[in-house]
Structures are given as C-alpha cells and as structure tokens.
Image: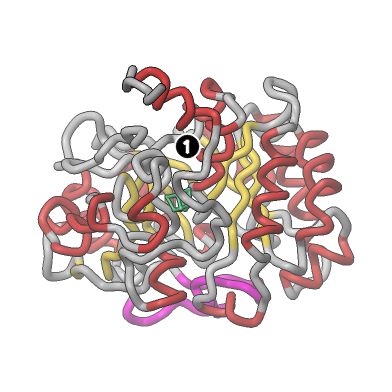
Amino acid sequence: MIPGPVFASAPQRVYWEITRACDLACRHCRAEAAPDPDRDELSTAEGLALLERLARFGQPAPHLVLTGGDALKRPDLFLLIERARALGLSVSVAPSATPLLTAEAIRGLRAAGVEAISLSLDGASAASHDALRGVPGCFERTLEAARTARAEGLPFQVNTLVSRETLGDLPAIYDVVRGLGAQRWSLFFLISVGRGTVLAPISARECEDLFSWLAGLPAGDGPVVTTTEAPHFRRVLLQKRKGSTAGRHAAGIRDGNGIMFISHTGEITPSGFFPLPTGRVRRDDPVTVYRESPVFRALRRVDLFGGRCGRCEFRGVCGGSRARAYAASGDPLGEDPLCAYEPGTGGPDRAREVAEAGLPRRQ
Ligand code: SF4
C-alpha cells in the first residue's frame, strides 16, 4: 500500500456552516438553504465560544472555512472572522453570488484577513449556470465578484458541481475559470444528499475519463485542480506518474481524516455531505469529538475499509469518498461506487513498488 497521512490529532480544515440562510435556490443545495436563518442556528456567543474551542486543537491550527447558506447573510460575520484570526485560525469564506456580494464586501473580507473566498460556477454561460442556481443574474454576479477579488488581491477559488447536467460543460467552464485568474478550480462530485438528490451523478467510467482529461491539463498554466468527494483523482495522478501534482492535492485528506464539519445548529459530522452525527458543539467539545469519537476514529483507519477500497493499494492516499459510500450503502466504511478501479490491476506505481521490493522470481 502507498502510505498516506493520518490526521489523528487535528483536522486540516474545519468547515463551519455559519448559517443556512441564502437568497439563492440552487437545485443541488446540500444545505437545503432558505432565505431566512434557522431560529436554532448558533448564536454569536455560541459561535465565539466555538472558535475558542477550535483554537484548542493547537498548532498547526486547522484552517477554518466559513460556509453556508450564504456566509454574508450572517450579520456577525466580520466579528467571527476577527475573533478567529485573533485566535490564530486562518479563514476562508464561501459567499453566495447575491446582491450582498458587493465590491465593498469583498474589500472588507480582504481587510479582515480572509485568505481566500470561493465562488460557485456550474455553467459556462448564464443560461446553464442560472438554471442550476435558480436565480437569474447569478452568472454575471459571480464573474463580477471574481474580477473584483482579483483586482483587490483577494485569492479566490471556483467551485463547480460535477453531475450529469454539468459534465459536458466542464471544458468550457475550465476556460472561464482560467480566464478569470482563479487560484484553484475545485470540482465537487455530487453526493445524493439535500437537494442534490434531484440531480444525477455521473458514472464511474465517466469519472475516470474526466480524471484523465483533468490530469492532462497543463500544469502551472491555469488554476490548480482539486476534487471534493472524489479523492481517487489522486490515484489517477499517481498512475500517470504526476507525483508532484498529486502532492498538491492533500493526499490522505478525506471525510473525517483531516476534515470536520459543523452545521448551523452545531452538529458535528465528518463532512458536509455526510449526515452521520458524531456530537453537538452545544454539548460536546469538538476537539474531543474529532479525536475520540468512534466514527472519526474509524474513518481514519483504512484497514477497516471494505470492498475495493479495503483491498486497494491506493487507499492510504485516497480511501474513497466516505460520504458517498455511506449514501450508497449505509456503510461509511464501504467502497466508493464512483471509482472504476479494480485494486491490484495496475498502475505504474504498483509495478514499481513490486520491482523495488526485490522479490525473487521463479525461473
Ligand atoms: S478503490 Fe477506493 S481507495 Fe482505491 S482508488 Fe478507488 S476509491 Fe480510492
């Protein structure tokens, strides 16, 4: 097996869904967001207390992603950012492309010390993007926000959904993302949770073809390409002997191993697409939950994984999407059905590993 890191003491990234309020109505919204905040969402005092707890992970501190809903719908957003920064947490923000995402708001985020923002783009044209987002004008507003962020020197990544509805548009979307000057293009592979159940996932074969195309994009010319809920892109990069690129893809990180999610009401799960509660911040210490809960501990143990992921020589750096395994079979340790790989059948790395093991061969 190719070893991968185990993030046992602290996640690399904590996603905190600070609100579910959002003025968009995206067809695939994980959070099933609504225009008004949930009355049960964490209060400002509870949010500030949560940040204190997260800081107790120690150094290196996890990176905090403030997401939603629309992070800008939270009136105390800048107070939360200020406190997080004061506690030594680096912060990114995921706003929605609504009239709240003004040039002033973007300048404010940069001035507050936000490292980067993420913008969603699910189509290369207004017609395709706005149809998924449910609000006319969203496409133009997203492009405008990207241009403003670039002009203001605030790094941004573009998030794009991968589903049957967007698959054919991805090359054109890549051209748009590249033209905008995004630092990162993060492809999110649909998991059937929330409103995501109304869209259709791609097949494992289509995923493999997509990865081949992504792996062939020119390195160093355009955004860094990353995947969410499809860690087997790392396997494809390794098979294509693109080790340096693979290293930039945060090998080993997956739901529960390097990632922790906190919902708007304080529920702790291994990721935002993985509705398996492990604790509540109103009652439990998130540091203890991450380190000690049976779910998190099991998700860090690739030796417990089942099916092809359990036999796979790439499970240390990949391990499959635990959220998809759970959605598909109810078993969070099962195999990821979006992967077409049959373990033990190859890849140049396996052949090299076998050769380097120096085993005698029968003449
Ligand atoms: S079989 Fe599982 S661990 Fe192996 S590459 Fe596919 S998803 Fe990753």
- Can you give x and y, in whole percent of width and height, for residue 273 in the image? 44, 66
Give the residue at the far front of this rendering: 363
Residue shown at 16%/41% (left/top)?
Answer: 9
Instruction: Tell me which segment is drawn in magenta.
Output: 20-40
Disc 1 crowd, CA 10 A, few/some/many (<14, 14-19, 20+) = many
Of residue 317 and residue 263, the one placed in the foreground of this image is: 317
Residue 286 among magenta residues: no
Q: Nearer the viewer, residue 177 or 65?
A: 177
In the rendered image of this protein, does residue 24 appear above or below residue 138? below
User: Does residue 52 appear to the left or right of 92 in the view shown?
Assistant: left
- The secondary structure type at the circle numbered 1 is loop
Q: Position of residue 289 (x, y in %)?
A: 15, 58
The image's colour scheme reads: secondary structure
Residue closer to the observer: 253 or 99: 253
The secondary structure that dominates the magenta segment is: loop
Residue at (52% x, 23% y) in the render = 243
Q: Position of residue 338 (x, y in %)?
A: 55, 61
Q: Residue 24 lies in magenta, yes or no?
A: yes
In the image, is residue 195 above or below residue 308? Answer: below
Q: Which amino acid type is shown beneath numbered disc 1?
A: Val
